Image (cartoon, helix red, strand yellow):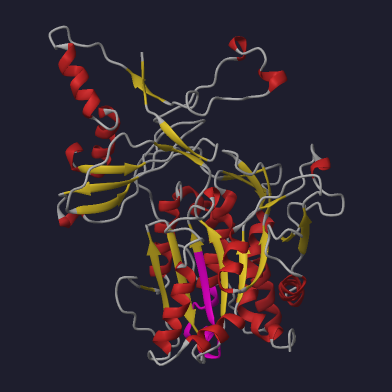
Amino acid sequence: MAAMARFQLHHPSPFMKPSTILSNFPPSSARIFTINTTNCNNYLSGSTTRHRKLSTTSAVTSNSESSSANAESSYSIVSDLLDYLNESWTHFHATAEAKRQLVTAGFHLLNENEEWELKPGGRYFFTRNMSSLVAFAIGERYSIGNGFHVIAAHTDSPCLKLKPKSSSSKSGYLMKLVKIKRPLLRVPTLAIHLNRTVNTDGFKPNLETHLIPLLATEPEKASSEPNDKMNSSSSKDPHHQLLMEILSDELGCKVENIASVELNVCDTQPSCLGGANNEFIFSGRLDNLASSFCALRALVDSCASPENLANEHTIKMIALFDNEEVGSDSYQGAGAPTMFEAMRRITSCLGHQSVGECAFARAIRHSFLVSADMAHGVHPNFTDKHEENHRPLLQKGLVIKHNANQRYATSGVTAFLFKEVAKIHNLPTQEFVVRNDMGCGSTIGPILASGVGIRTVDCGIAQLSMHSVREICGKEDVDIAYKHFKAFYKTFSRIDKNLDVDC
């Protein structure tokens, strides 16, 4: 008989990962890990991860304008993205890795519970729930009322999560991350021989009973051990004892020190390049870690030296939210006022507490948000699923998304401004509109745009197999997105001041 664990469904797709809460754990061991339980063809896994030092500046070494441009155009972040994807099996790991890179780049960690001391030229960030993050760099020439230039994305991906059988309330918690890399769980499908209608009726699993993963075979019960004692012990355990022992070994603590867990199932196969010319990226979680990483690196590299902020009048920002895949209505999601509260606090700190609502309102009017979320590239086997004049291709640049029902926040003005950034830097763009006879997904763009009325454009890298355990995108599009985001930070102010709307 196989031992099983029950999961709650977090958007249908086979992944899983965990963050653990430890009680009464020695303070000396309070370093951050990650609990990652991954799914290789639906497996659970875990182990500590290596950290590869990433470059934080673009490879421009020549004093010549032309040679600098050539170096900039040939610079690639694809290998760094693969490292990021392989580190970031869950939203917790994605945030932890982003945090590590920001600290390495010289950004200062803030605490939302404390007073902030900010200054022009400073670079800062904070995290919330270990799964969302806001980072920003203040221009040396910033003055109250100037705008924020923001790129927003999300850290979560569709997955299966372990159901909590029980919870405890104790003092002395430490949050830790764990990653178990070896295949640990598998959700086996039913053989076609026992389900002859699957090819005609489609794969239609019962989401409650058919997604239970296998952990281990159940050992034979010792005849001398009373059944009542065994049943009593197992009924009190919130999770299988074997699973808890594996986690405790990984964390270096006792099972009883683990007060609570949040576990996600992930694919153990590493992200990699593929295709005849290695032109594709094959990976889980491209939606939306590819956007998150491009935004992160664009921010870090656009203010890598003090000179980058010396003549800057605005505040450059990224906001990476959790829970987008389930509606964003959470403490760590885009539905919470996290980003706008941060903007208000920044304005107040830099104004030495003397600014009022009018100053913040002016700052919002001067601000611009890029909502970055992966886009549906045209599938060569299903071209009819796209509107005939809006079929984004892989390797052809960022896709600007439009929807008359405001499922995307793009307007004619915001699309024009974002395309002007690309035009100045010779970067390609594409456009997407869903067919009128099909439903349209959405992003955090409309949520944030309507939050305080910030101008917003929705865009994304074209991909195939979205929400699959193994997604596909073009590696050239990753570099184009990075360059477009970096160009946005560099030149948007100059473009924006030449356009008069509502004057």
Q: Residue furthest top?
A: 223
Q: Residue furthest right?
A: 388
**197 versus 88 height, above or below:** above
Measured from the top left, where is residue 444 in percent x and y? 58, 60
Q: Nearer the viewer, residue 459 or 104?
A: 459
**35 versus 347 height, above or below:** above
**255 versus 299 height, above or below:** above
Q: Quadrant of residue 67?
A: bottom right
Q: Nearer the viewer, residue 133 or 299?
A: 133
Q: Nearer the viewer, residue 280 or 167?
A: 167
Give yes or no for residue 305 being in the magenta stretch.
yes
Measured from the top left, where is residue 195 in percent x and y? 61, 13
Location of the N terminus (image quadrant): top left
Q: Is residue 283 visible?
A: yes
Q: Answer left or right for 410 relative to 218.
A: right
Q: Quadrant of residue 425?
A: bottom right
Q: Is residue 119 visible?
A: no
Q: Quadrant of residue 311?
A: bottom right
Residue in view at x 52 percent, y 69 percent:
318
Q: Answer left or right for 466 relative to 315.
A: right
**Which region shows up in magenta?**
301-319
